[in-house]
Image (cartoon, coloured by chain):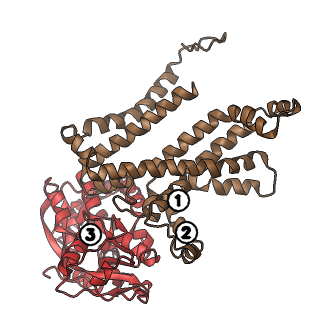
Chain colours: A brown, B red
Amino acid sequence: MAHEGTAREKQPFNPLLAVLAALAALFFIFPLIGLITGAPWGHIISVITSETAVQALGLSIVASLSSTAIALVFGFPLAWLLARGSFRGKGLLRGLTTLPMVLPPVVGGIALLLAYGRKGFIGKPLESATGITLPFTLAGVIVAESFVAMPFFVITVESGLRSMNRRLEDAARSLGASRRTVFLRVTLPLIWPSLAAGTVLTWARALGEFGATITFAGNLPGVTQTMPLAIYISQSSNMTDEAIALSLILVLVSLVVMIFRRDRAGAG
Amino acid sequence: MVTGNTGTTRRGEGDMRSIRVLTGASVAALMVALAACSSSTTTNAAAGTPASGSAAAKPSGTLVVFAATSLTDAFNKIATQFEAANPGVTVKFNYGGSSTLATQITQGAPADVFASASPKNMTTVTDQSLTTGTPKTFAANQGEIMVEAGNPSHVKSVADLANSALKVVTCAPEVPCGALATAIFKNAGVTVKPVSQEENVGGVVTKVSLGEADAGIVYVTDVKANGTKTTGVPIPASQNDTTTYPIAEIKGAPNATASAAWISYVLGPSGQQVLKSFGFLPPTA
């Protein structure tokens, strides 16, 4: 069974646990099998090299990576503040920044329009001052994806920050380390697992984002049509072959990253 | 349950969720209704044939209608009248882009009736022999340019839409209103680059209503339904395109009696009057 290097008692075999776990695993595996068997293997090469697919995949990768970078840059300080700071309204702030996680994505999209759209209370002055508009652009896609994905990063990293042993930081300081050294040599390595997990989760959420994107940024092949949007338009036009093939690509990309992450971060 | 009337945001992106909710709720409701249905047909058959519908039994129970987004307001009103004329019937709608609805039906969604905004999407369903009888055309619609209220961009014609400074939105080409837009641009001899291609006409209405887009190609009925929120710029007949709406009963419909009655009602004088009042053209257009 589990070789964890400690003198841990072997888990007795629990049939109920095994059955429930097996059912859970199958629940996830069956749709994947459905995708694989339903794929148009005969002409799949032509589908995945079509202009639609290539453009959509390219946009998806650029947008999701950008959103993840934004989450890292802006989400980390926020997570730090929520974990370490003490100020009135902290609970409310945490609630607000994680609201996109529970909001239906389309609602998020509408809210984004009302704030950052052409007539939005931020978007309108932004356009007058700089000429920048966000809807119908790749920047708009990135905004939509960041909006729904960043909360995942904040929550995961905040949790990591809270559960780390702060005494180690104190010990380092008392031994004369500068704040910068403490952060780089003590804090970061300690929260590394939650940082990595948060980053991957954020990226995955951004990659799969649909509702807020199509509402806020619109749908235009080559400009804003990410993979999920392309898949949606295909399947809603009864082009099921194309939809399944594109879905498989997305699943493959996600699977590779998920498996890779497991290896790097160790067991879970 | 009849879904919203003039809520423009409802007609567009909310449809995916309401599709799932309605489909799930309908299946459950139909199970209950079926029991009631079977008992009521035996008692009413003895009472004689009612005036409405061609079926021998009186329609009752839940009727699930999959209809193109552009039919929302008109069908909601027809449903109110139909339910009043046929107490015991509850009409439930699943509004969406016609191509999405056709896909759902071919994948087994429990619809009784399908009303499409173009013959092409109905063909998707008939190609798989999923209808009972031949689809009948019950209405027609033409395109119109929708702009922000008061027409601040001073759009006067289709040619004006070629201006790259304008943000124009259309439906995706696979959807009836998208094919309409393509045809109109071709007839007018202009190249228009839309900034977004929506999955159904409600999405176009929303973008223009919110002021995100300067103009969009929608149906005449959409401009009328949206009232003062937006302004319409008519398209001359020489450039315009017409789309016809077919309606059909789905094969194996859980509520065949009510389906036939609904189709007759829509094709009959009351239904046609309601459609006309919302700006639809008669089926022979």
Location of residue A157 (image quadrant): top right
Image coords of residue A120 (percent x, y): 55, 73
* Residue carrying label 1: A143
B82 sits left or right of A100 in the view: left
Q: Residues within 10 Å of mark 3 (few under 14, many from 20)?
A: many
The residue that appears at 70% across and 49% down in the rendered structure is A77
Q: Residue furthest right?
A: A174
- Are callouts 3 and 2 both on one chain? no
Q: Is residue B284 above or below residue A58?
A: below
Q: Are the residues flagged by discs 2 and 1 in contact, CB closer than 8 Å? A: yes
Q: Are the residues flagged by discs 3 and 2 in contact, CB closer than 8 Å? A: no
Q: Secondary structure at mark 1?
A: helix
| Amino acid at pointer 3 | Gly
For this rendering, which residue is in front, B222 or A19?
A: B222
Report in which chain the residue with disc 1 lies. A
* Residue carrying label 3: B178
Q: Are the residues flagged by discs 1 and 3 in contact, CB closer than 8 Å? A: no
Closer to us: mark 1 or mark 3? 1
B1 sits left or right of B268 in the view: right
| Amino acid at pointer 1 | Val
Report in which chain the residue with disc 3 lies. B
Location of residue B176 (image quadrant): bottom left
* Residue carrying label 2: A116
